[in-house]
Amino acid sequence: MKNVVIHQIVTFIFTEDQLRAYWEKQRGATPFGRLDDREYMKLAEDMLQHSSHSQLEQHVLGGRWRIKEEAEGNVIAEDESRGDRHVEIIDTDAPAEPRRRMLIDRMREIECPHCTFAFYVRRAVDGRRDWTCPSCGTPFHDTTSQQK
């Protein structure tokens, strides 16, 4: 059997209206407008965990429903406490601030010099320099990759 496995960093966008509807469905005791930033982010993560695959399609940046402008604006709050997830609350009505390129912590970005395919390796050994590109299959020696 031949399986295809695609590893991808995905951005999910949960709009205020979607979160409000989810909160009301959960019958939260606190009014939605009184949630603090931490509770707001926790609500989005709970919605992520309890969404089916088809429901998640409406939250994926670059999918049919979400465009990059919905992920741009003034960052009000963020949670960087976990290495595999970064959560932000963004005011899309406010102008976007200059931002750093966001990569999940403890990931190493490696770009194939033959086909320019970029792939990410978790817990990569710093001394390792020999790689095989998962896209084109060409082995190469990398001297430019760095721990993110």
Image (spheres, rainbow, N blue to C red):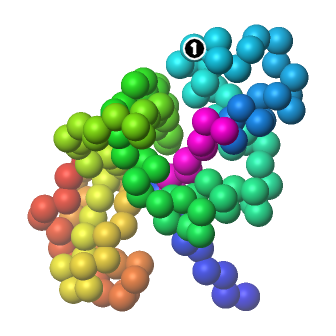
Q: Is residue 54 visible?
A: yes
Give the magenta-colored segment's residue range: 10-17
> Residue sitting at 56 percent across and 67 percent down?
63
Image quarter where the C terminus lies is: top left
Near-viewer residue (43 or 111): 43
Near-viewer residue (134 or 48): 48
Left of 74 or right of it: where is 142? left
Is 14 covered by the magenta stretch? Answer: yes
Q: Give percent across and percent down for residue 32.
A: 70, 20
Q: Is residue 101 above or below residue 121?
A: above
Q: Main secondary structure of the magenta part?
A: loop
The residue singled out by tag 1 in the image is 36
Near-viewer residue (18 or 142): 18
> Residue sitting at 56 percent across and 18 percent down?
38
Q: Give percent across and percent down for residue 69.
A: 40, 54
> Residue sitting at 76 percent across and 63 percent down?
54
Quarter residue 30 falls in: top right
Q: Is residue 117 above or below residue 114?
A: above
> Residue sitting at 73 percent across and 88 percent down?
1
Return the residue found at the far left: 143
Q: Give percent across and percent down for residue 20.
A: 71, 32
Quarter residue 43 falls in: top right
Amino acid on which the number 1 mark rests in the picture:
Asp
Q: Is residue 105 above or below residue 23?
A: below
Q: Is residue 105 visible?
A: no
